[in-house]
Image: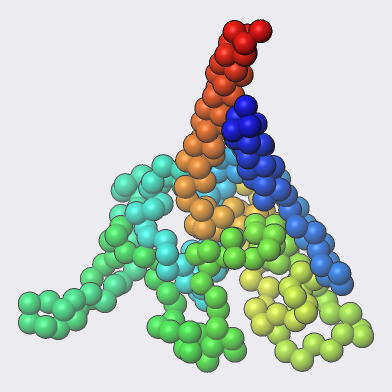
Amino acid sequence: MKSISRALSLAALAAGLAFAATAPAGAAEGEVALKHAEWSFEGVFGVYDRDALRRGYKVYKEVCAVCHSMEYVKFRNLAEPGGPEFSEGQVKALAAEITVTDGPDSSGEMFERPGEPKDAFPSPYPNPEASAAALGAAAPDLSLMAKARPGGTNYIYSLLTGYVDAPEDFHLATGSYNLYFPGHQIAMPPPLSDGQVDYEDGTPNTVDQMAKDVAHFMMWAAEPKLEQRHRMGFQVLIYLLALTGILYFTMRKVWAGAH
């Protein structure tokens, strides 16, 4: 009896911790609360919006990739289940747009070749020092950004739409003023403007929409197996419920013979 009760208690505790982990964190004292958008991947049954992922990739490619790398994402990932799910031909064409230094060849020389699906997204700078020299501060890699920052996608969405004029009493030494960036002074100028990226599917290409789409894409980049994890979590819950029922009726049968 004690072992059964303990098992059920641990299962309930695990479920409670899992629920708490999905709750958004509040703003710290003195900070502006993040904007909260509705994301299709939230919740136990959440899935990625394929159209949003494809649009988000385009925003990343045409805007973010000018300064930021995504070194943990490979072109072939764009065709995998649970992601943007581009066709194999589309992935090959996207990869072929870049040039990769490879080698050495049989003579010991490095050579250049068109990109292939196995290649990672290219970095615009050879190292962080070059990035800092060109931009004033090294641009962070975006592969895990959606998981590395408190607030995740809501932080990215808020940051990209949080550029406003600095208050009169705020001394802006350099860069831009952003409501949601810690300290409000950010080196990155506003990266998005209305109409900047053309959407083939007819979705309005406003700053707000582009910010949501690229945040959606960065969430997938940081957690490409999210849908698989959600399915597994649901299956585990079904298993635990079934096990609980079996244990309950077994307990009743065992103790019924004791009377």
Q: Position of residue 80 (x, y in %)?
A: 38, 46
Q: Please indicate whether residue 128 sits to the left or right of residue 256 in the image.
A: left
Q: Can you see residue 141?
A: yes
Q: Residue furthest left?
A: 106
From the viewer's perspective, tell me whether residue 35 is left or right of residue 189: right
User: Which residue shows up at 34% across the image and 54% down it?
Assistant: 76
Residue 251 percent coordinates (x, y) = 60, 17
Front-lying residue, 131 or 63: 131
| Vertical comparison of 137 with 3: above or below | below
**Taking 211 as reference, is 229 above or below it?**
above
Tell me which residue sits at (42%, 61%) in the image: 73
Nearest the viewer among 161 and 23 is 23
Q: Is residue 122 left or right of residue 229?
A: left
Asked if 211 appears above or below 204 in the picture, the reply is below
Quadrant for residue 187, please give it: bottom right
Residue furthest right in the image: 169
The N terminus is located in which quarter?
top right
